[in-house]
Image (spheres, rainbow, N blue to C red):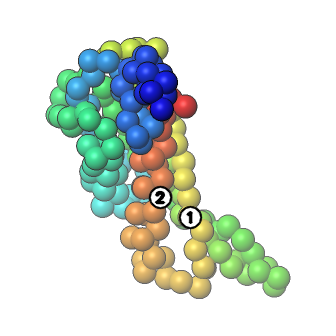
């Protein structure tokens, strides 16, 4: 047990039980509002994505979420929000539709610029085509946003 504790303290950067690896000296992170440049705009998506990302970093790391310049900075945009047919039934009718959301993210680590990245992330959910999209949109969006936030978090601070 003592050996494993020593190995954690010998690692470069900080450690948390969430698996986050925060560079030594990093105390702050900023998450800029993600503007929505998708052709189809869900008016709640930008705020939900931004708030959920801020909450994830606040709850899962020791970093303080701030506005403006920070030790680590996340910015980006929503580039796609689409729904389309995903599967056909035996008689060639649409049986499943797919909601897809794509975001483009820029991460700047001012304590270790080797960790900087720019990357797009896409997640989707399929739903029964017989359902009215407006009746399932909110829950589908929430599930997708949660996965997108996990993707950004993992790429930013989880170095397994």
Q: Tell me, yes or no, if residue 81 can be seen here.
A: no
State the quadrant of the C terminus: top right
Secondary structure category for the residue under label 2? helix
Q: Is residue 17 above or below residue 117?
A: below
Q: Nearer the viewer, residue 108 or 5?
A: 5
Residue 83, quarter of the rendered image: bottom right
Q: CA distance from mark 1 to mark 2?
A: 7 Å
Across and down, in percent, residue 81 comes to 47, 56
Q: Nearer the viewer, residue 64 or 72?
A: 64
Q: Earlier in the sequence, mark 1 or mark 2?
A: 1
Residue at point 49%, 82% (across, down): 132
Residue 25, quarter of the rendered image: top left
Q: Which mark is residue 144?
A: 2
Across and down, in percent, residue 36 comes to 35, 48
**Crowd class of label 2 (few under 14; some 14 to 19; many from 20; radius 10 Å):** many
Name the residue that disc number 1 marks. Answer: 125
Across and down, in percent, residue 37 comes to 39, 46
State if disc 2 and disc 1 touch (CB < 8 Å).
yes
Secondary structure category for the residue under label 1? strand
Residue 48, quarter of the rendered image: bottom left
**Crowd class of label 1 (few under 14; some 14 to 19; many from 20; radius 10 Å):** some
Q: Tell me, yes or no, if residue 89 can be seen here.
A: yes
Q: Is residue 97 above or below residue 92?
A: above
Residue at point 41%, 42% (across, down): 18
Left or right of residue 141: residue 44: left
């Amino acid at each position: 047990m003592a050996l494993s504790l020593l190995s954690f303290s010998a690692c470069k950067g900080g450690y948390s039980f969430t698996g986050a690896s925060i560079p030594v000296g990093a105390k702050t992170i900023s998450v800029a509002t993600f503007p929505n440049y998708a052709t189809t705009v869900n008016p709640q998506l930008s705020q939900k994505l931004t708030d959920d990302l801020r909450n994830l970093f606040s709850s899962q790391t020791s970093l303080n979420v701030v506005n403006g310049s920070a030790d680590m900075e996340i910015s980006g945009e929503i580039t796609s929000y689409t729904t389309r047919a995903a599967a056909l039934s035996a008689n060639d009718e649409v049986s499943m539709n797919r909601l897809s959301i794509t975001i483009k993210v820029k991460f700047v680590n001012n304590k270790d610029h080797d960790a900087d990245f720019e990357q797009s992330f896409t997640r989707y959910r399929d739903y029964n085509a017989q359902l009215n999209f407006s009746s399932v949109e909110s829950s589908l969006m929430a599930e997708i946003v949660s996965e997108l936030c996990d993707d950004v978090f993992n790429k930013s601070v989880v170095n397994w």
